Image (cartoon, rainbow, N blue to C red):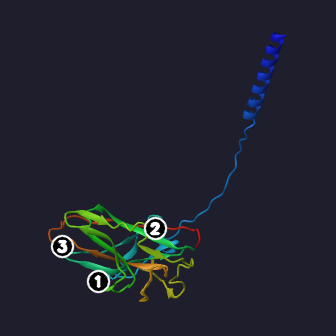
Amino acid sequence: MCDGMRIDRRLVLIGVMLVVLSMTMATQYATTKVGYSYSIVHPSESDIRFIGSDNSSDNIRLLRVSGDNGTTDSIIIMSFGNITAGQNKTYTAALGIVNEEAFKVNITHVNVSADTGTDYLQVWLHADRDANIDNDATSVCVWNYMEGGNQHSYDYADCIWQLAAGDGDTTTINGAAETTSWDERAHVMYSNSNTNAVNGTDDYVWIQVSIKPPDNADTSASYAGEIWIHSAASTEDQ
């Protein structure tokens, strides 16, 4: 009788194991898909776009497309022209940043990387297109090269400047109040508007760039690099 009970228990144990095994084998696997789409557009038509204003020494917009505007090799650059050692050259509206997204965008920080030569740039965000930052109380210094080859970016944590939600119209700034026009020579949109940008209220801001090479700057070197503009946005509670 005891032996029979032991056999029954073994059978029950095997049955339980089979049930557990069958539950494990019942795990479902599936393959599905989700589509995506996007467009590659000209920098003047992007959701966060750059616009020109100031002219360079060749009387073409400082902000311009380098290369053939109709090819994928074209890139947007700022061409500062020729600068003398010891000279301070300043553009109060080197470029503008415009938000066309349907939500607010925070500019969080700016940094400069030099590909060739030494970085001698100073960069500000400010409201008044044609005013030097010394005469514009809204100005925020975001990058400042320092003597000796050291650079310093300013950490403003969450936000240097907030761009208001845009309207998706790449022919206007400040809602629809100001027009941006197409420059056929520089191949960028531009604005000469003197309406000041308001931090957190308007969808655009101006960038002033100063170049201050020292008296002993290397005249045989070439100077080129990138200005990196970092932004962040949240689509919640907009």
Residue at mark 1 to residue at mark 3: CA–CA distance: 23 Å
Q: Residue at x 78, y 18 (%)?
A: 10
Q: In terms of secondary structure, where does tag 3 sit?
A: loop
Residue lying at the far front of the rendered structure = 2
Q: Amino acid at mark 1?
A: Asp
Discs 1, 3 touching: Cβ within 8 Å: no
Badge number at residue 231: 2
Can you say which quadrant of the picture contains the C terminus?
bottom right
Q: Amino acid at mark 3?
A: Ala
Badge number at residue 134: 1
Going from N to C along the chain, the mark reached first, 3 or 2, is 3
Q: In terms of secondary structure, where does tag 2 sit?
A: strand
Going from N to C along the chain, the mark reached first, 1 or 3, is 3
Residue in front for this viewpoint, 28 or 94: 28
- Residue 160 horizontal/vertical position (percent): 41, 72
- One can see residue 134 in this view: yes
- Residue 119 horizontal/vertical position (percent): 27, 66
Q: In terms of secondary structure, where does tag 1 sit?
A: helix
- One can see residue 227 in this view: no
Q: Residue at x 50, y 87 (%)?
A: 178
Q: Residue at x 31, y 86 (%)?
A: 135
